Amino acid sequence: MERFVILLCLCFSSSGEFIISDLSEITEMRNLRLSDLSGVKQTDSVVECAVQCANQLSCESLSYHSSQGLCQMHVFTLSNDTTGLISEDNWNTYQFCRGDCPASCGYVYNQTLDWCYRFVKDPKKNASQAVEFCRDNGGRMLRITSSERNVHIENYFRSNGIWTAWIGGFSPNKDDNFVYEDGSPVSYLNWLQGEPRGQRYIRLRLLSVFEWINMGGSAAYYFMCER
């Protein structure tokens, strides 16, 4: 079963220092909790629950009841095959995305290309929302900077049944001059014949062939981030 995650960037202080950690919601686990509610604490928010979990080295995941403010911390990551799960509304389950390229949170590392990326299927975003999502979660939109990367992503699409996604690169003035979000120029492009066409964002599309197309950005699609 595919696992989809929603990432929240949490910033909190401990001993006067700021700590940044990625907390991801395991969306397939919504409204599921452990039947054993031992160790449940009352907290004001999921952020407070996450801070308490992060301060315990043994805490790998947590469950939070949004309406009652109940926080339960776990020394393992919950999954559908975890024993003792029951259904109850308003429970959400989260895990920490630790490390430079956490596979548990959907990231893939290609050693040959030294490339860490993830395909985000849920929730779909428009182009500007996708940019914000990747940035808020410690990354950026995917950058295809060479033919080798382009071929790699095409193969990734084909092997995973993916047909479209927003990627990095946009034309601020809609004049077909493309830059990345930090202002650096897009040096590699692989447009479908007839593209670009005076629009702002880049979307990959796999039909009979792998295509780069130029879109306005308002429609919600899958997207790709990298770290």
Image: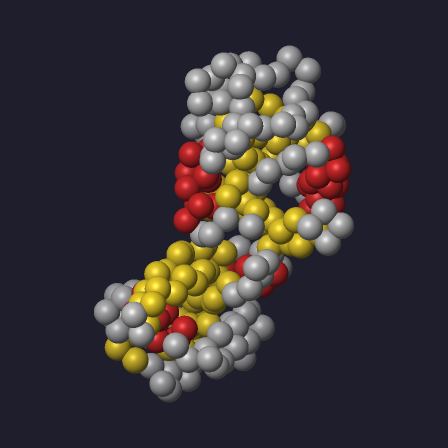
- The residue at 57%/47% (across/down) is 226
Q: Is residue 101 depicted above or below 194 in this figure?
A: below
Query: Which is nearer the eye, 109 or 73?
Result: 109
Question: Is 207 on the left-hand or right-hand side of 61?
Answer: right
Q: Is residue 138 depicted above or below 147 in this figure?
A: below
- The residue at 73%/27% (across/down) is 209
Question: Is 98 on the left-hand or right-hand side of 11?
Answer: right
Q: Is residue 19 depicted above or below 165 in this figure?
A: below
Please tell me in which quadrant of the rendered image residue 126 appears: top left
Q: Is residue 81 depicted above or below 149 in this figure?
A: below
Residue 60 placement (x, y as % from top left): 49, 74
Residue 99 placement (x, y as % from top left): 55, 64
Residue 83 placement (x, y as % from top left): 54, 79
Residue 213 placement (x, y as % from top left): 60, 23
- The residue at 43%/28% (across/down) is 218
Question: Is 195 on the left-hand or right-hand side of 130?
Answer: right
* Farthest-out residue, bottom: 38
Please tell me in which quadrant of the rendered image residue 202 appears: top right
